[in-house]
């Protein structure tokens, strides 16, 4: 599998060096900026640990999430010393906005790093039948499950963020056989892969980050859906996306982008098609609703997860 090969190639190159584990606990509202620092400068991405122990299937409510623990790993090579300094400077700047205890560091051997890293990325069940799984662990898959294999070493979206959760759940509910699906801000390709495996006839992903496009294409190959999905660098409007093309438009991006792209998202939809708009903070929900209304979109449903909102529109 492509994702697994990429992972082990990195291990082989770094195997002669000890590793450094960086760990910090941050208030939940500051998880995103710290996670971006860890993702950008760590090796392989970032692991985010939240409080668990709740079961929505038996009616339990999700407990408050006051904080989360973030981890990343760095090989102790000259090239990574400057990156370590950047991470510490970034966390210090974020610490001016909220009290932080600072980064805890621990030296580990390469074999311990590999085991620790993999322990943080276990299969994630989403909706009724979707399972987001790393390449090395399909142990919890049941008959009838649809497995989306994402290599966390390629980053750009592993399904653990609540906005991706909501987008996947909505996709599973809305999709019909042979639907055409547009994935705006495709990132790792997780939504595109999900659409293809749920029966879409054709999927187009667009993504402004060229590195993410490469990661997304690797994930498409690893999941065996390259024949159904095409991922292009760029955004909307796009020459590869005709007007009125999509039965479903997935836009798991951010509030500002949703506001700016609202007319183009509407233009890409077939009459009666569905837009899943996600990545919306509650405090910016009103601006997105106003932009969607101005573009001629009607909000049919709002899905909430703490401070995050997703909207299903037609």
Image: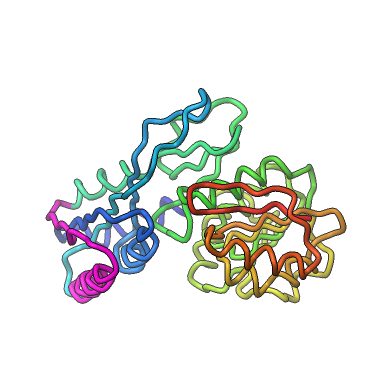
Residue 145, compared with residue 74, is above or below; it is: above
Snapshot quadrant of residue 153 = bottom left
Q: Which image quarter is the C terminus in?
A: bottom right
Residue 307, compared with residue 175, is above or below; it is: below
Q: Nearer the viewer, residue 276 or 192?
A: 276
Q: Nearer the viewer, residue 137 or 179?
A: 179
Give the x, y percent position of residue 142: 54, 26
Question: Which stretch appears magenta?
Answer: 81-109
Q: Residue at x 15, y 57 (%)?
A: 104
Answer with left or right where residue 210 lies relative to residue 91: right
Give the x, y percent position of residue 112: 19, 46
Q: Residue at x 48, y 48 (%)?
A: 306
Q: Residue at x 57, y 66 (%)?
A: 255
Residue 182, compared with residue 239, is above or below; it is: above
Answer with left or right where residue 183 lies relative to residue 61: right
In the rendered image, residue 137 lying in the magenta stretch gets the answer: no
Snapshot quadrant of residue 238 = bottom right
Res. 1 in view? no
Res. 90 in view? yes
Give the x, y percent position of residue 132: 50, 42
In the rendered image, residue 106 lying in the magenta stretch gets the answer: yes
Give the x, y percent position of residue 114: 26, 48
């Amino acid at each position: 599998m492509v994702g697994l090969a990429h992972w082990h190639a990195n291990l082989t190159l770094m195997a002669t060096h000890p590793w450094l584990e960086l760990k910090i606990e941050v208030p939940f509202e500051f998880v995103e900026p710290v996670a971006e620092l860890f993702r950008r400068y760590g090796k392989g991405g970032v692991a985010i640990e939240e409080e668990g122990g709740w079961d929505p299937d038996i009616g339990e409510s999700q407990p408050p999430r006051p904080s989360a623990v973030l981890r990343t790993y760095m090989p102790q090579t000259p090239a990574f010393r400057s990156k370590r300094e950047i991470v510490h400077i970034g966390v210090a700047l974020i610490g001016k906005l909220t009290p932080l205890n600072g980064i805890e560091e621990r030296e580990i051997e390469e074999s311990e790093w590999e085991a620790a890293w993999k322990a943080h990325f276990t299969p994630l069940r989403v909706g009724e039948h979707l399972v987001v799984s790393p390449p090395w662990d399909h142990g919890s898959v049941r008959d009838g499950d649809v497995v989306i294999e994402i290599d966390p070493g390629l980053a750009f979206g592993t399904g653990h963020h609540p906005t991706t959760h909501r987008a996947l759940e909505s996709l599973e509910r809305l999709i019909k056989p042979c639907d055409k699906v547009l994935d705006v801000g495709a990132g790792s390709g997780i939504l595109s892969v999900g659409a293809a495996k749920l029966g879409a006839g054709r999927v187009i992903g667009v993504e402004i980050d060229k590195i993410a496009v490469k990661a997304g294409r690797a994930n498409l190959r690893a999941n065996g859906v390259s024949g159904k999905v095409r991922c292009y660098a760029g955004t909307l409007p796009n020459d590869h996306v005709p007007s009125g093309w999509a039965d479903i438009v997935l836009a798991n991006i951010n509030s500002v982008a949703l506001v700016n792209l609202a007319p183009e998202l509407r233009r890409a939809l077939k009459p009666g098609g569905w837009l899943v708009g996600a990545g919306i903070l509650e405090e910016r929900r009103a601006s997105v609703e106003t932009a969607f209304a101005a573009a001629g979109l009607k909000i049919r449903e709002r899905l909430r997860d703490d401070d995050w909102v997703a909207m299903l529109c037609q």
